[in-house]
Amino acid sequence: MSREIKERLKTVCIYILIITGLIQIGILWNYENQGAPISFFTGLFSKDSQISDETVSEKLFIPYRLILSDGEITYWIITKNSEYYRSFWNEAAKGLEKIVSGEARLTETNEKWEEIIDKQGILVDFGYTMESDLLRWFLGTGRTLQELPGFRKLMIKRDIVRSDTGVFYICGSDGKIYRSDPLRYEKAANISEISRKLTEDQSENYRRYFTLSGSKINKPDDEPDVLYVASSPRYWPYFRYTVNPPLRADNEEILAEALLGSETGRYNKYVYNEDVVQYTYGSNIYRYYSDGYMTYRYLGSSEAAAGTKAGEALVTAYKFIARVRELLSSDTEIILSSVKKRSGGAYEFGFEYRINTMPVKVAYEMKDGGGKKLGYAIKITADSKRVLECDWLLLDFKQNGKGKYNDRLLEVIGSRNMKFDNITVKGIDTGYYISNGVNGLLEPSLIIQTGDSTVNLDLIPQGGD
């Protein structure tokens, strides 16, 4: 045998030893973490491993609301179904990228927020405080070259002369207002032309809104940019939905696979009172209740690094959600609604449902007996390594007709014998509201955030005044 062949054989043997050594290390590590050899191999090829950072960013880096202001008194909510959504959102994302990278300066200004939002432009509301490290992760820009405050809302005020140029105003969580250098976006849509089209639109796709401050009816503690309806027509079309626990969860095999993934065979199953299914293994406990409520708890010690980034924890949480959501109908959208940093390098995320672009608000009394309410469809705590706990109200929504409803703020409040002056308004959504006893028909509501509490008012059906 020639020397060259011997050397090649040696090289092949070395590669084989390295690969088998790595596999053995993976198996041992998995055993120590309550695993079994098979889960190490299946984990390499699971759906979770196919979810990239880019996938998570694409799915979750979206505004809670995208709003067009005509610069006079009228506002329109631009939903994902709108032909204008992509252009407006791309402009906002590109501008944020320039600000984060340091290409455009951000300076504090004395201008007032209620005056800024009255101008012609695009108002972006993320629905939660966007901290700079998470924004950098979403944009993929790495380290920022200038300090960026946490914020929930920004306004792109268009230049009067140059329609492709705008100034970004950021309403910081520190109570200050910041403005950018003028930013040019070559693909900027013509806001004046779009505003004209929406004003003339007769398709009942774009409801006209006003702001509390623009109408001069905001009270001292109200948020000035809260949108409300006061315009004609008096009635507007909304879908009704039936809501039930997911039908797929009635199949034990499908339920186990969605909750446990490739580790299904490792768990012990218990059934309590015929309406609670529990899966346990080691430090992991899953419970699924017959009304769709699901909990997960990791009872082991967490060794999360204090330096865990929000984006890393968000990817961990999203992989868990992507697996379990296989139980739900595909047309239910799940959006990020809350981000809170916890001790020990963990993050708590809240997620909400959207159906046909409309929000679904949840106030569900959890099953732990403590009287606490689940304020989101999903509340999940995770670090860069694993999910630590999750509460999720799993529901399927099915359209059940369409009707016209009176959604005008003062008339809806008046129908409940309430006084507007007695309500502190921090936010208003037209959507759907779910509490305990969710089975049945879901009709649209006016959902008013008053600070620490929520007031839910059913819209008035036509003929029901």
Image (cartoon, rainbow, N blue to C red):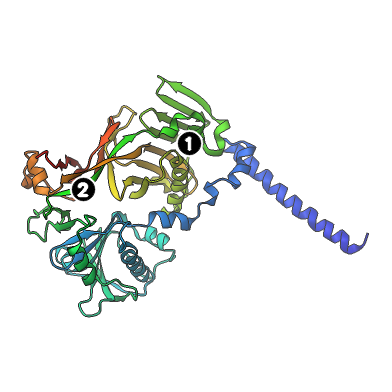
The image quadrant where one finds the C terminus is: top left
The image quadrant where one finds the N terminus is: bottom right
Residue identified by numbered label 1: 259
Residue identified by numbered label 2: 237
Which class describes the residues within 10 Å of circle 2: few (<14), some (14-19), or many (20+)? some
Q: How far separated are the C-alphas under marks 1 and 2?
A: 37 Å
Q: Give me the residue at 35% from left, 61% from top.
A: 132
**From what the image shows, is residue 383 above or below residue 133?**
above
Specify whether 183 is left or right of 175: right
Q: Are marks 1 and 2 in contact (CB under 8 Å)?
A: no
- Which three-letter amino acid code belongs to the residue tagged 1? Leu
- Which three-letter amino acid code belongs to the residue tagged 2? Pro
Q: Secondary structure at mark 1?
A: helix
**Residue 283 makes an appearance in the image:** no
Q: Position of residue 432 (x, y in %)?
A: 25, 42
Tell me which numbered mark, 1 or 2, is placed earlier along the sequence: 2
Specify whether 226 is left or right of 79: left
Q: Which of label 1 and label 2 is nearer to you? A: 2
Q: Front-most of 314 and 239?
A: 239
Q: Give me the residue at 64% from left, 38% from top.
A: 37
**Residue 51 makes an appearance in the image:** yes
Q: Position of residue 81 (x, y in %)?
A: 32, 56
Q: Give me the residue at 9% from left, 38% from top.
A: 416
Q: Position of residue 280 (x, y in %)?
A: 50, 29
Question: Label for residue 9?
Answer: none
* The image quarter in which residue 120 lies: bottom left
State the residue lying farthest toward the right.
1
State the residue lying farthest toward the bottom.
161
